[in-house]
Image (cartoon, coloured by chain):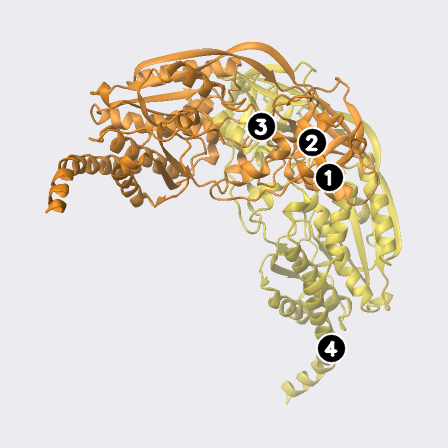
Chain colours: A orange, B yellow
Amino acid sequence: MRKLILLAAALPSLAAAQPVADRAAALRDAALQDDHVAWDLLEGLTTEVGQRLAGTDAEARARDWAVRRLTALGFSNVHVEPFDMPVWVRGEEHAEIVSPFPQRLVLTALGNSGATPPQGIEAEIVAFDSVAALEAAPDAAVRGRIVFIDHHMMPTQDGSGYGQFGAPRRQGPTVASRKGAVAIVVRSIGTDHHRNPHTGVQTFGAGAHPIPAAALTVPDAEQLQRILARGQPVRMHLTLTPRNTGTHQSGNVIADVPGTDPSAGMIVIGGHLDSWDLGTGAIDDGAGVAITAAAAHRIMQAGRPRRTIRVVLFGAEEPGGLGGASLYARHHPGDNVVMVGESDFGADRIWRVDPGLAPANAALADRIAALLAPLGIVRGREPADAGTDLGPWVRGGVAAVDLNQDGTRYFDYHHTPDDTLDKVDPAQLRQNVAAWTAVLAAAADAPEAIAGVEPRPAR
Amino acid sequence: MRKLILLAAALPSLAAAQPVADRAAALRDAALQDDHVAWDLLEGLTTEVGQRLAGTDAEARARDWAVRRLTALGFSNVHVEPFDMPVWVRGEEHAEIVSPFPQRLVLTALGNSGATPPQGIEAEIVAFDSVAALEAAPDAAVRGRIVFIDHHMMPTQDGSGYGQFGAPRRQGPTVASRKGAVAIVVRSIGTDHHRNPHTGVQTFGAGAHPIPAAALTVPDAEQLQRILARGQPVRMHLTLTPRNTGTHQSGNVIADVPGTDPSAGMIVIGGHLDSWDLGTGAIDDGAGVAITAAAAHRIMQAGRPRRTIRVVLFGAEEPGGLGGASLYARHHPGDNVVMVGESDFGADRIWRVDPGLAPANAALADRIAALLAPLGIVRGREPADAGTDLGPWVRGGVAAVDLNQDGTRYFDYHHTPDDTLDKVDPAQLRQNVAAWTAVLAAAADAPEAIAGVEPRPAR
């Protein structure tokens, strides 16, 4: 009898949820079938703007482009929230083995790299196969030399190799500088075998002055290893002339799909508008911009949702999540954000969902997982953490849904000149839009309240 | 009764051929199992010399390297046959769309390209999708502009797309120059989607003065097509500063496996030692150097063959077969060369043999095909023509055996910075050595005479 009463009490919300789920399934299938908004946005951004390094004129053109396009698509409240940032730009970059086997190597400066004099520097290479090995070396073995750090990253579906094997890029320059190295070159944090280097940000820590820091392509790093294996001293000539251009403006582009019930809270999704300067930022992160905007647009076209959906195209993610920090500082806790979701891992098919909802929302998490299963998406067991841009909200106690793209080939192209439109498969892009559309449809119209989650510290 | 007599007449050579074939099969299988000479040569050449542009110091270092290595391997008569050549070297290369969507494009100068002034040139793009379309255009539509020519090359196993779709690179610059274009950019003659351009030789014909000529990467050519598709005038800024450095020395490296019977004639095989300057020339043509030298070395190790086997590592193939022409001019018809074979199509597995022997040698052709079948090699029906370096001998009436590598991915890397050691699969390299070893063993010890073939004009 108690059971029956409990069942009866649960019935109203189940009854209200079913039509929402049916509608979400229909929207999902329509997106999978014929979405072209994401491709049009992605093709437009990469063609009409191209690379858009944070804080530069190119990024400003991207904001103008985004405001025009999102306005034309019918979004409300389309505007830019600007912020200032220090800007670093690439210069000349050349490296040459001087002896014993003279030949050029291909590399690119890492973000915030120091510069050599215009004519370059020449020094002997000292090689390590991890940051730990560099740290363990006596300073005398490093001082006055060019440090080379290798690593052993392999492709993984969930992209987890990036965190673990990215240390040479992230910590290597600081450690090398502290030990008196005149420069550092690392094996690109990538999984391909092409002569395209992978750039990426690094920040010199306390006690480290900026030294020239660059990534060799994977084939060039392997070539250097073969040369070193001959056992003779290896001397490199290195020219890197990046520079800091001072403080410039970046900004986040905001676009809303207004909801009918302000008290139900807002859902914030997005990707980042800036890219590295080498490619056209198709997978990183034109795709995220296109996918989240297209999914929100499909919800808007289907009629007004209960909750407002805010799409944020973040500025200056690559230098360290400056746009994400700016959004959080401005809007938390003022805005009643109840759920966030970020797309910043390319456009290969979504293979896993990690619903990061509160225990009180277990039924909503189940409905979301059920809506995604027909797209071949498995339910994961990892904590949802959004990403660089929306992670602050999760750590601050806001629910999130993580949709994980297949990362097997993501680090073949990531941060290289090869991050271009041809790397995106339109059918997989539609699957992404379908998945995000399903999540948004289920969450924006969820009849129950969406609860906060346990705040947690940054990893 | 006539039949029996004929059979009896054939028996002696059959009887002599069978032990040769058995020995060839054993040598083939040993090479497939454990050859390391080819890898050692290829790894050594690409690591210790790297790129080796024809006529430069790097190519001279490659000759010194080859003489040392071939001598150490026990070859006889190791020496260089020098010749002079005009040398062209690459300079700066930058391209930028100025309007309507400012962005850099990645390209590289084609061989013998003219130069822009150091500060570059700026002009409007006029686009064509074939050389024929450019030829058909009125000169007024081309004059003062930068021509862009696209093409539609796709991968083929036999590499036949290269001849057909290479016209924009080979003829485009001449036609554009004659029509008054200020420069030409072509879609790289390649089948990949990486930001690595494919260089290659072109020669300005009569009535064409040198203009800057370059290849855009495939992704950049597609980007330019998308920009052009917007229908607005597209202006490009182009800087290319290659230069001719005058006459320098190149040379062919010769190494012999002496035979026991000079009257039986000589077999000449080889690949080319020079490479383009962008990669380390692993597939083009370090592989051919390594494969043919390793196969000849296996024959040498097994005992003295009947016919001398000469390995030639050609200089200056890339600028137009200068080493091949030099060899033919010096040694034809003085040397009694009865068969030639060239490896210049990478190191992926050999999938087809085209035995280009005289009708009188049908039995030898059958024996060679039978020896190759266990390696998965099919017998083809194309005329054998060796290649750029040894083709003159075939056209002059010398028999040849063509062993065709699988070319499906060859034009992903050909003439790009990506032509590096990691593109070579050691197991497939061994299959190549095994196939060449079988052919050499069968032909060098063939008991019958190896006849000449019908001379034919150049294609």
Residue A185 is marked as: 2
How many residues crowd mark 2 within 10 Å: few (<14), some (14–19), many (20+)?
A: many
Do pointers 4 and 2 mark residues of a single chain? no
Q: A334 or A289, which lies in front?
A: A334
Q: A108 or B356, which lies in front?
A: A108
The tag earlier along the polypeptide, 2 or 3, is 2
Do pointers 1 and 4 mark residues of a single chain? no
A446 displayed left or right of B242? left
Q: Which residue occupies 57% across, 14% down? A: A87
**On what subunit does the disc labeled 3 rest?**
A
Q: What distance separates the C-alpha of mark 4 from that of mark 2?
A: 57 Å
**On what subunit does the disc labeled 1 rest?**
A
Residue A224 is marked as: 1
| SS at mark 4 in the image | helix
B445 displayed left or right of B428? right
| SS at mark 1 in the image | helix
**On what subunit does the disc labeled 4 rest?**
B
Q: Which residue occupies 72% across, 47% down? A: B286
| SS at mark 3 in the image | loop
Q: Nearer the viewer, mark 4 or mark 3?
A: 3
Do pointers 3 and 1 mark residues of a single chain? yes
A373 displayed left or right of B423? left
The tag earlier along the polypeptide, 1 or 2, is 2
Residue A361 visible in the shown view = yes
Give the residue type at disc 1.
Leu
Quarter of the figure with residue A66: top left
Where is residue B131 shown, x and y percent of the image? 54, 31
Q: What distance separates the C-alpha of mark 1 from that of mark 2?
A: 11 Å
